[in-house]
Image (cartoon, rainbow, N blue to C red):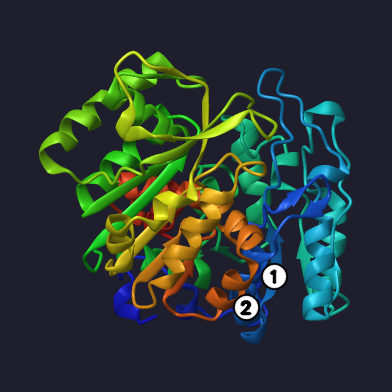
Amino acid sequence: MKPSDIDPRLPVMQNIDLKDKIVLVRVDHNVVKKGKIKDPYRIDATIGTLFNIIDKGGRPILMTHVGRPRDKKTGQINIDAGTSVKPVVHYLERKLHIKIAVPDIPASGDQGIAVLGKPVQAAIDDLKNGRVSAIYLPNTRWFQGEEKKGDAREEFARQLSEVADVYINDAFGSWQPHASTFDINNHLPGYAGLLMQKEIVSLKKVMDPERPFVGIVAGSKYDTKIGPVSSLYKKADHLILGGVIYNTYLCAKYGINVKGVEASDISLAKELVALDKDRGKIVELPFVVESDMLDQRIEGNYRKLDTRKFKKGDTFSYFLDIDPSSFDLPEIRDILLSARTIFLNAVMGFTPNFHEGSEAFYRLICENKTATKLFGGGDTLQEFKVLNPGLYLKALDDESFYFFTGGGAVLKAIEEGTPYGLDGVKALLDNKKS
């Protein structure tokens, strides 16, 4: 990564003196589910930033959100082991052979934690005196002011600023404008961490791709993906759809009805169908798997269908996968094997019961040894690891692959046409103290 790869207006951590400074670091270690780490990739991706801070003589205080402990209807915050940062802390302690303090801060009933208070000050004393190597604050979403608007949020940002000298944002995947990713920039000099910089640089390969460029996107609802799908369509030479998005497209194109696809989404997808009549960018995967049951895979209750035989008015049950034979077709193989850039944010099937399509798809993409292959984080990366573990391990050491840590942030940046418009990044650009 060269300095010229980054917008010179973005303040970066390489340019600051951290010796003897308390450094507040926002990371995206949201990898815990029911008290266990699903996949440590996002933790490992931030270790370079942590090493850099310690190597420069800085003393890090880490923070991340975990899950969604706040009830959107009542506003109550549920504090329990299932959304604790302690599994992440134990992982880092074992991996780095260091001691990390986790302040035990009492909550204010069911409204979450109100103030940082004495436990944090005691931990900072231990940090300054070398009794611990780092501090890890409790889940940021356990605090009243993290997601709220108004005085509580401003107060939380102010409290965070009082425990540190410098703020570093290394949580590209946490793009929502919350107190710990956005408002904190009003109080402390803020800088981009090494991972955030790497994500921004890698996004340039999607924004200005080497061609032919194949974009692949899937999702559970069409209306939530209209923006990124439209932006990818404009940029790509070929676009492949998966999941309910693809089902919606098929309904709009052929005038069929598929269980689980809403009429409002079909209406929206008709615009894409009309656009593609002239441009022909969408690559249709002709063999789909129809299932009578959504949550089970029972022999005799699912079958392979050919989209080319659909007739207007046909009604089907759930389409839960792409049949692997789609990826054996010469025209499909040629498009993917001749691509120079492949961006993938997609799981083809409704896993875990319907996974053969995703497994075959990932395998075919890996056959292309020369293309830059960019995986859009989240479920895409998780399923690649689960379904193709051998290929996943090879890809980790292959420079032609890049795994983004935040799929939602990547799609948002693609929709906006730039990573510099994301709230967390923009806040660093606007940070006058840096």
At a point 62% along the width and 62% down the height, the residue shown is 385
Which residue is nearer to you in this view: 34 or 347? 347
Which residue is nearer to you in this view: 313 or 253? 313
Left or right side of 331 for 355: right
Residue type at mark 1: give it: Pro
Q: Which mark is residue 60?
A: 1
At a point 36% along the width and 41% down the height, the residue shown is 286
Q: Determine which quarter of the picture holds residue 56.
A: bottom right
Left or right side of 370 for 298: right
The answer to whether one can see residue 334 in this image is yes
Residue type at mark 2: give it: Ile
**Mark nearer the N terminus (2 vs 1):** 2
Q: Determine which quarter of the picture holds residue 314.
A: top left
The quarter of the image holding the N terminus is bottom left
The residue tagged with tag 1: helix, strand or loop? strand
The residue identified by callout 2 is 53
At a point 34% along the width and 47% down the height, the residue shown is 240
Label 2 Cα neighbours within 10 Å, binned few <14 / some 14-19 / many ≥20: many
> Mark 2 and 1 residues: CB-CB less than 8 Å, in contact?
yes
The residue tagged with tag 2: helix, strand or loop? helix
Which residue is nearer to you in this view: 410 or 356? 356
Work out whether 269 lies above or below 328: above
